[in-house]
Image (cartoon, rainbow, N blue to C red):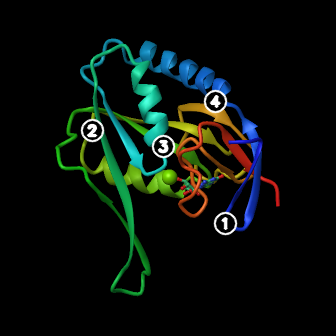
Amino acid sequence: MGDTIKLHDKKFKIMIPAAEIDRAVEAVAQRINRDYADKETPLFLGILNGSFMFMSDLIKKIEFQNELSFVKLASYEGTESSGHVRSLIGLNNSIEGRHVIIVEDIVDTGESIDHMIRDLETRKPASIEVCTLFFKPGSYRKERPIKYRAMEIGNEFIVGYGLDYDQLGRSLKDIYVVTE
Ligand code: 5GP
Ligand code: MG
């Protein structure tokens, strides 16, 4: 892949090369290794589809015993006037008493992650933290602090390393930003 690519109707240029992503993943993994060293078998919970590549690289750098699972936030039209309802699917085992680390590709306004955390809290885990590959501080609208942020970016739209533009671009090893 070259330095600029076209996905659907938009052009993207390279913004963060793979080596730089790897350094950021390494740094966040080391923080998690320190913070969870004495916790009993933490559970990494990836949010599909966007987090699959981040999870794959992150988990290889984790030095304590862990479990790993993926969930999906499914959007569907509710039957009542409340409109859009988003439910968590794929979480089949109990997380009661477990230390949960949510692994997300990007936290933008914080709506998705906030919804996810509120759902998980009803299942009584011992703790919940979020580890996101990207954080957009200029867009985040929630009070809840996001503890582990591998990288921070502005309000630009990015693709690659799991993130898509209308399903394209997930397999790119570098991060690209939209240009036009
Ligand atoms: P939030 O609910 O925090 O506003 O948005 C989170 C979701 O929006 C992410 O999980 C992701 O699916 C999508 N998103 C937000 N910003 C970007 C971006 O720059 N690129 C891509 N590909 N998706 C984004
Ligand atoms: Mg996502």
| Residue ID for mark 4 | 18
Q: Nearer the viewer, mark 1 or mark 2?
A: 1
Q: For label 4, count other residues whose C-alpha is less than 10 Å away and answer few (under 14), some (14-19) or many (20+).
A: some
Q: Are marks 1 and 4 in contact (CB under 8 Å)?
A: no
Which mark, by number, is residue 125?
A: 2
- Whichever of labels 2 and 3 marks the residue nearer the N terminus, that label is 3
Mark 3 or 4: in front is: 4
Label 2 C-beta lies within 8 Å of the nearest ligand 2 atom: no
Numbered label attached to residue 104: 3
Disc 3 residue type (three-letter): Glu
Q: Which residue appears at 53% of the width and 60% of the height?
A: 167
Asked if residue 55 is positioned above or below residue 91 in the image, the reply reads above
Measured from the top left, where is residue 128 in percent x and y? 38, 37
Provide residue 22's location: percent of width, then percent of height: 59, 24
Give the residue type at disc 1. Answer: His
Q: Is residue 155 visible?
A: no
In what element is the residue under mark 4?
helix
Can you tell me whether the CB of the residue at mark 3 lies under 8 Å from the nearest atom of ligand 2? Answer: yes
**Quadrant assignment for the C terminus:** bottom right
In the displayed structure, does residue 99 sit left or right of residue 162?
left
Disc 1/disc 3 C-alpha distance (Å): 24 Å
Q: Are marks 3 and 4 in contact (CB under 8 Å)?
A: no
Q: Residues within 10 Å of mark 2 (few under 14, many from 20)?
A: some
In the structure shown, which secondary structural element does the residue marked by tag 3 occupy?
Answer: strand
Q: Amino acid at mark 2?
A: Pro
Q: For numbered disc 2, what is the local secondary structure?
A: loop
Disc 2/disc 3 C-alpha distance (Å): 18 Å
